[in-house]
Amino acid sequence: MSTFQAPKGTYDLIPPESAKYLAVREAIAAPLRNSGYGYIETPGFENVELFARGVGESTDIVTKEMYAFETKGGDRLALRPEGTASVLRAALEANLHKLGNLPVKLWYSGSYYRYERPQKGRYRHFSQVGAEAIGAEDPALDAELIILADQAYRSLGLRNFRILLNSLGDKECRPVYRAALQDFLRGLDLDEETLRRADINPLRVLDDKRPDVQKQLTDAPLLRDYLCDACKAYHEEVRELISAAGVAFEDDPKLVRGLDYYTRTTFEFVHDGLGSQSAVGGGGRYDGLSEMIGGPALPSVGWALGVDRTVLALEAEGVELELPASTSVFAVPLGEEARRVLFAKVTELRKLGIAADFSYGSKGLKGAMKSANRSGARYTIVAGERDLAEGVVQLKDMESGEQSAVAVNEIVAELESKLG
């Protein structure tokens, strides 16, 4: 037993469970790669100010949950709590928006960090796959991303998730709503910190999960009643495009999400089988974020889907993923000559793309066959001195138990044929 353990609120991904997470990441990424999104990877830490400006100084993420530290050189850095600000920073730094092909479409996969109270579905280290379309204001882009996320979830076999949709307005109509909401909130029985938050960003109060706060928000003014004509028309087109694609959604006039940079379209994917941590992913449009972090005006939209919570949602529905076998062929050599010959055959099989493993160490036949069973291999190759003297190896079908002699120089072709 090791002296050390994983830090509180984190987890290790260990085989065979880790294969599930890889499959989820791949399923989410597949429709993005098919739709013109290129892969981007950013550092695990950034300048603190990037998140303070972009995510919002009034958000819990920045005020309570961010892992911030000072380097020996005096730089103030933070482990990334989300992906959008980092991806936009990288796109601006590389001048991707100046290459003449807007929107810049990017997808990413990685780990993110927030100091939260650990519980099932909420970790201090978590994994997401995200997508961003940077530099175009078009309802079709918003609809595209929602449709691609729906496609990804359905390809995994998920069915019991819901898409919540709302519009947060823009710089023209949101200030009017903001003032009306602030007037409403000042008349409630709220604690000092919540009232302070209402002064900075009143929409964040709508996202407060405490029952005593939610109870008082029943009659809060709704943003949809304050949308300007342009925002109404934009939102209606997003709704029409999603509906035309056969993707079901629910209008949720109180949906605001937890980050300050959202404008107009905002959406969330929820799964009712996960209890309090029901959101498996979400996103929206963030037309002013580029300017917030020092860039030009670049209207953009994106989402992030939680890998951890998607796995929990699959388990809640009892969905078993069809995972490729980690090992298809297992080689068991008996003697030094057999080790040399079978190791060469395993190498050949791997070059052909066949998952093959080898009995390492000095195990006897019984121990080696136990390893073959544990590997999950469909076929096992066994060879000893007598077999090699006759120019054959023994090929065993681990499902049927049938065993036959196959010529040494034909075994690779035979297995390629059987597994092809």
Image: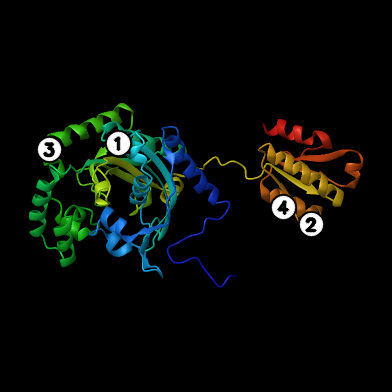
CA separation in Å, label 2 and label 1: 58 Å
Q: Residues within 10 Å of mark 4 (few under 14, many from 20)?
A: some
Vertical position of residue 4 compared to residue 295: above or below = below
For the residues bearing labels 4 and 2, Cβ distance under 8 angstroms: yes
Measured in 3D between alpha carbons, the distance from the residue under mark 2 to the one under mark 3, in whole angstroms, is: 75 Å
Q: Nearer the viewer, mark 4 or mark 3?
A: 3
Residue that appears at 84% across and 47% down: 338
Q: Contact (CB < 8 A) between labels 2 and 3?
A: no
The mark that comes first in sequence, 4 or 3, is 3
- Labels 1, 4: front one: 1
Amino acid of disc 3: Cys
Residues at circles 1 and 4 in contact by the CB criterion of under 8 Å = no
Amino acid type of the residue that numbered disc 4 sits on in the rendered structure = Ser
Residue at mark 3: 228
Which residue corresponds to mark 4? Answer: 371
Badge 2 is on which residue?
A: 363
Return the disc, 2 or 1, that comes first in the chain's sequence: 1
State the SS at label 2: loop
